[in-house]
Amino acid sequence: MMKKATLALPLFLLVAGCSSSQTWGWYVIDPTTSSGWTNVKFLVSGMGATIQISLIAAVLSIVIGLLVALPGLSEKRGWRLVNRVYVEFVRSIPLLPMLFWVFYGLPIVFQSMGMNIPIDPFWGAIITLAISDSAFTAEIYRAGIQSIAKGQSEAAQTIGLNYFQTMRYVILPQAIRRILPPLANQFIYIVKMSAFASVIGMQELTRRANELVVTEYRPLEIYTLLIFEYLVLVLIISAGVRWLERRMGADERG
Amino acid sequence: MPDAAIELVDVNKWYGTFHVLKDINLTVQSGEKVVICGPSGSGKSTVVRCINQLEKHQNGTIRVDGVELSDNPKSAATIRSEVGMVFQQFNLFPHLTVLENLTLGPIKARGLSRKEAEDKARHYLERVHIPDQADKRPVQLSGGQQQRVAIARSLCMEPRVLLFDEPTSALDPEMISEVLDVMVELAQEGMTMVVVTHEMGFARKVADNMVFMDAGEIVEQGKPEHFFTNPRSERCQKFLSQILQH
């Protein structure tokens, strides 16, 4: 039933779009016409920026998340508090206000400290996405590491490994199999949230669509294509993650 | 007593308000084999876990090789490099092969080359009678083999003292003797050992000193000849009669 419905919807859109050209105007993105082809190229060329922002933000989030997760696993209350405060604070800030704060506010903070560090839309988006997401990755790491039996780190200690060696050689290699699937979810989340970068002027997929809508005034067709652009991106990521999971044995039980 | 490998003096430990270790005094001479027995929850595992600092005691003194344990992380590192530990649940690293399990400590903590570490690992695998399992993963081995790998892993660090925390309690009955045999051989070669176990046959064979614990106290300790035939305390008599019945 569900499957039929999901198939029927795009089909309906297509048929409806082709049959009554008065309400639909697929011509704006019809690649067989020269103006349509120009439009499509313009829209798709935002892909590079979306991918770059998402990838760099994801890598930063993975690093920051681990650095935030580790004190959360400490036996010392002070360290755990550092983790709690960061996670609770960061994950309570909606992405858009944080983006505004970073893009418009952070340069002023830098200035007041005597530093002249301009923040362009590219890095503004990356910093915001990375920090916003890192609170979630930190929790994913913490859950993954805590799921590894305590005996593993005890055994590592008794053969003389220090804390970082224990993490690096014993705990993380085992935890990563459990961490990978939820981390992939977060990556997809980043890709989608990167659309917010459009509001600070970043020329990525959504910004391009907005700009074309303003000149062509064909929002339905252009935003439909936009949705499919994200769909393709996310499907590619999903396939990549599944391949990685198979390679690391994360899809196995136990 | 200049040659004490381990000394516990008036050691006390609490979990919250629960008094797990009460005034524990225990000396283990170099080369000595001490067997600790007692009902579950008596604190015997906690004693060995305190000796290698997996748990902290709140007061009293623990000395290993003359070095007093303190909060100083350096002392913990020194102690751990001299004290090996064999766990009830083996705690092998499942993502590594047997050989990698054995070489990890020597390479990362001791700074040996891969070649030296592997030679040493193969040597100790031979000593625990499983030289041909080096490239397998722990899950591919039987419980008895896994525990012998765990013993070999400890030996690769060439510790001065080896602690055993109920090493045969998680094993199927038919695998217990292969592990105990290895432990008896180690004992005969002069290893200093502290063993928490209910295997009284093993205790009779190797123990120099028997320790009976109950409710966080050392109730009785002595030479096995006296300990088994003529225990002084009632609690110890009762315990022995219960476990020796079968």
Image: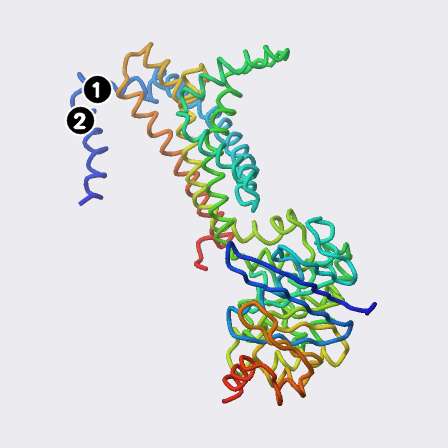
User: In the drawing, what numbered circle is on residue A24?
Assistant: 1
The amino acid beneath tag 2 is: Ala
Residue B135 shown left or right of residue B82 in the figure: left
Horizontally, residue B29 falls left or right of residue B153, namely right
Q: Identify the chain of the residue marked 2, using the numbered disc in the image.
A: A
Expressed as whole percent of the image width and height from the top left, the position of residue B130 reads: 65, 76
Q: How many marks?
A: 2
Chain to which the residue tagged by mark 1 belongs: A
Residue B193 is situated, as x and y percent measured from the top left of the image, at 70, 73
Tag 2 secondary structure: helix
Where is residue A77? Give x, y as percent. Answer: 54, 41
Depth check, front residue: A46 or A82:
A82
Q: Dividing the picture into quarters, in which one does residue A220 lie?
A: top left
Looking at the picture, which amino acid does disc 1 mark?
Answer: Trp
Q: Give me the residue at 64% from left, 73% from top.
A: B195
Classify 10 Å Cα crowding around label 2: few (below 14), some (14-19), many (20 and above). Answer: few
Nearest to the observer: residue A65 or residue A244: A65
Which mark is first along the chain, 2 or 1?
2
Please name the residue shown 67% across and 78% down the image: B183
Task: Provide the secondary structure element on which disc 1 rests.
Answer: loop
Q: CA distance from mark 1 to mark 2?
A: 8 Å
Circle 1/circle 2 CB separation < 8 Å:
yes
For label 2, the residue is A16
Image quarter hosting the N terminus of chain B: bottom right
Image position of B121 with respect to A127: above or below: below
In the rendered image, residue A24, in percent from the top left (x then y), is placed at: 21, 19
Residue in the picture at 73% in, 71% down: B28
Q: Residues within 10 Å of mark 1 (few under 14, many from 20)?
A: some
Q: Are marks 1 and 2 on the same chain?
A: yes
